[in-house]
Image (tube, grey):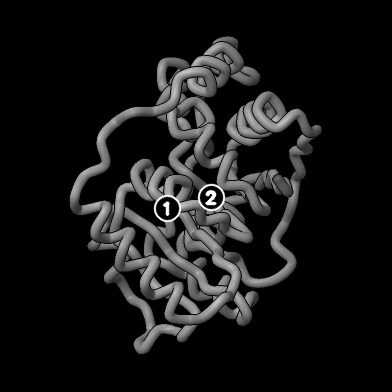
Amino acid sequence: MDANSRSIVSAQTGPHADLETLVRRHAAHPFRKPVTAYNQQAFDAAMALWRAQGAVPLILDTGCGVGWSTLKLAELYPDHFVLGIDQSIDRLNRGKPLPLPANAAFVRADLVDFWRLLLQAGVKPARQYLLYPNPWPKIGHLARRWQGHAVFPTIVALGGVIELRTNWKIYAEEWALALELLSGKAVEVQAFVPAGEPLTPFERKYLASGHALWRVETLL
């Protein structure tokens, strides 16, 4: 993979000044957007696949893209069931071995609906991964970042071990701050280099391009 990934450029020099206000507002006012029929159907199908495995813990690989991470997580956690969730059918269909491992499946769905459906159903994942989400680096983009989105309190309420990875330190700092605001727990931002094979194509590309990587791992 070419080492040609550009560094993130932003006018922000630290966590967004409006982050705390936005997080507290979203926590106080539940997200009421109707769930689409398509996402409900995708959710029901995904839950059926998981429950068919028996009482095994669930891992969410959210925004999984082409699904490398989903397959690697299925290898790392053979006693778990891993759902790779992405809204792009093109990415989900791209370049994966078949058949898939018995403990993994891919779901085409909008994460905003999928997270809320999980919470409504009382499903508590053992682990949640958010690997290199779009940083939306412009100052006016705060509400598009997951920590500034109205669905963020739902992600936190689902709990488990939540791991975010990013190549933009400010994103990690905002994520940690937002988690602290809702959980009341101290949350640490860590610089890291993967101990083994990178989990995603983005992680591999960022490493090859010389980017610093950041991780926030929290048990809720």
For label 2, the residue is 130
Residue 30 in which image quadrant: top left
Give the answer, above or below, for where 212 lies relative to 205.
above
Instruction: Give the amino acid type for the residue marked by disc 2 in the picture.
Output: Leu
On the picture, is 7 further left or further right than 30? right
Closer to the camera, 170 or 112? 112
For label 1, the residue is 63
Task: Say whether residue 11 is visible.
Answer: no
Spatial separation of the CA atoms under disc 2 and disc 1: 7 Å
List x then y, in percent, for residue 110: 31, 48
Which element type, helix, strand or loop, lies under badge 1? loop
Instruction: Give the amino acid type for the residue marked by disc 1 in the picture.
Output: Gly
Marks 2 & 1, CB-CB < 8 Å contact: yes
On the picture, is 46 further left or further right than 209? left
Closer to the camera, 105 or 4? 105
Residue at image position (68%, 44%) is 214
Residue at image position (36%, 89%) is 99
List x then y, in percent, for residue 26: 49, 21
Badge 2 density bin: few <14, some 14–19, many ≥20, Cα 10 Å: some
